[in-house]
Image (cartoon, rainbow, N blue to C red):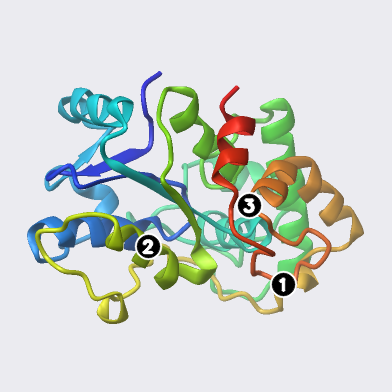
Amino acid sequence: MGFPGTWMTESESVVYRVVPKCACSTIGQIMYYSDHGRFFDGDIHDATTGLHKWAQEASQPIIERSVRARQVYAFTCVRNPYTRILSSFFDKICGIQRNGKRYRGNLVPLLIQKYGIEVGGEDGKQEFDQIASFRRFLLFARDTIRWKKPMEPDIHWSAVAGHVSTFIVNGGRYNHIFFTEDFNAGMQVVLDNIQVKHPVDLAKIPRFNESEGHGPKRAHPVEAYFDDLSMHLMWEIYKRDFQLFRYDFDNPANKMPKGPVDLDEVHAKLGD
């Protein structure tokens, strides 16, 4: 299986397990900058040079050697399940993607037909009942994750623990796991532990949000989207995320983790 979703600097200073919707665009650009002294011109996910990526065949043996030897500092970044799935809904379901089309072609028409979801019209900019539509989307997300119907789960709403685990199961070990919600502090730990060709000042780094502006703005506070049933579904889908990464399941309004990640626990529980 190897190391899907894994990026490494060309200088082999650091290796990163990408987790969708967890500041991955910004992290990728920081890695790129640390090697080249400039940012990639465009969406870092589109870069085919300047970074080793598992999706590029030529990079695979280089990444595999580095990860298995555990000589390169390895990290990932996680996010509160409540805000992550909301972000996925507004970006991927309601939004028009950067190619000018809907995400995954027939996905949105399927959701409108089978789950009664509204997405704000053709351009995603019309008024609609965000809360009702999101809760129906959550039902769909649960169905894809639990039963792989009506389709396989998408990387943007499949559990963070699942993404994080592939790196461990295939022989990698994380040196650091930090939170999107406390990004600068967490990323600084990474930078303090690696040698970079070009120094990175996190206070001056822009936030690269490739999903920003794709969809409608969230009209309500996070907690408004989650009633008792929605929270039940969230626990069913993301129980391990809440537990392993210390997020507050009982209070959707609290986006901050309740404590640091226990790396030994993560490796023990996700390494099966």
Residue where numbered disc 2 is placed:
189
Whichever of callouts 1 and 3 sits on the residue coming sooner in the sequence is 3
Which residue in the protein does label 3 denote? 245
Question: At numbered mark 3, what does the secondary structure look like: helix, strand or loop?
Answer: loop
Identify the residue at image location x=43%, y=35%.
173
Choose top left, top right, bottom left or bottom right for residue 15.
top left
Picture coordinates of residue 147, whole percent (x, y):
73, 26
Give percent across and percent down for residue 107.
56, 42
Image quadrant holding the C terminus, namely: top right
Mark 2 to mark 3: distance in Å?
Answer: 17 Å
User: Do the CB atoms of the residues marked 2 and 1 lie less than 8 Å apart?
Assistant: no
Q: Earlier in the sequence, mark 2 or mark 3?
A: 2
Q: Secondary structure at mark 1?
A: loop
Is 195 on the left-hand or right-hand side of 223?
left
Disc 1 and disc 3 in contact, CB within 8 angstroms: no
Q: Which SS class for mark 2? A: helix
